[in-house]
Amino acid sequence: QVQLVESGGGSVQAGGSLRLSCVASANAYMPNYMGWFRQAPGKEREGVAALYSGGARRYVADSVKGRFTISRDAGKHSVYLQMNNLKPADTAMYSCALGSGRLEAAAKERMYDFWGQGTQVTVSS
């Protein structure tokens, strides 16, 4: 069983920044996509960003483009989400996921086999 552990969540004021980290256990398969999803209370989980282990294939949701940057350590099972200019609408539980498939499906939960437990991000106005 692959395990994913997230860190870096917290509470910030609007306009602030946070950096989320996620590390997968060494038995994770390669190649893979690692991505970030978020779920706000009363809303469906949505894909935020995903990045292929080879680095070239990337998905970023329109709602965070220009503010969030996803990155990975080359050849390693780790992914990061740099979140700048945070807004109250970004408040959610952020979860890391690992899976395989096509870029066209990178925003879809069904593409991912393993999930972390999540880290809370709260942005106040």
Image (cartoon, rainbow, N blue to C red):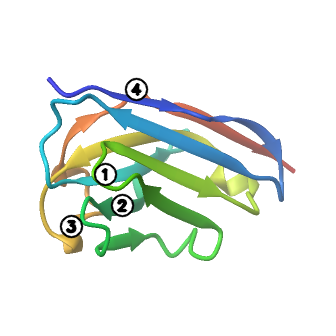
Give the residue displayed 48% in from the left and 44% down from the top: 39
The mark found on residue 34 in the picture is: 1
Task: Tell me if label 1 and label 2 are in contact, CB under 8 Å.
Answer: yes
Whichever of callouts 3 and 4 sits on the residue coming sooner in the sequence is 3
Q: Horizontal placement of 87 versus 118: left or right?
A: right
Q: In the rendered structure, which amino acid carries the disc numbered 2?
A: Ala
Vertical placement of 75 versus 7: above or below? below
Q: Earlier in the sequence, mark 2 or mark 4?
A: 2
Label 2, on which residue? 50
In the rendering, which numbered label is found on residue 20? none
Seen at 40% across and 26% down, the residue is 117
Left or right for 19, reference 124: left
Residue 119 figure quarter: top right
- Secondary structure category for the residue under label 4: loop
Measured from the top left, where is residue 62 in percent x and y? 51, 76
* Alpha carbons under labels 3 and 4: distance apart: 22 Å
Secondary structure under tag 1 reads: strand
Q: Position of residue 8 (x, y in %)?
A: 61, 35
Q: Quadrant of residue 22?
A: top left
Kindly report the distance in space between the C-alpha atoms of the residues bearing marks 2 and 4: 17 Å
Identify which amino acid the numbered label 3 is placed on. Answer: Ala
Residue at 21% x, 74% y is 104
The answer to whether one can see residue 71 in this image is yes
Between marks 2 and 4 in the image, the one whose residue lies nearer the viewer: 2
Q: Earlier in the sequence, mark 1 or mark 2?
A: 1
**Disc on res. 105:** 3
Residue 77: % across, % down: 30, 42
Q: Which mark is residue 117?
A: 4
Q: Amino acid at mark 1?
A: Met
Displayed quadrant of residue 54: bottom left
Q: Report crowding for label 4: few under 14, some 14 to 19, many 20 or more residues within 10 A (C-alpha).
A: few
Q: CA distance from mark 3 to mark 1?
A: 12 Å
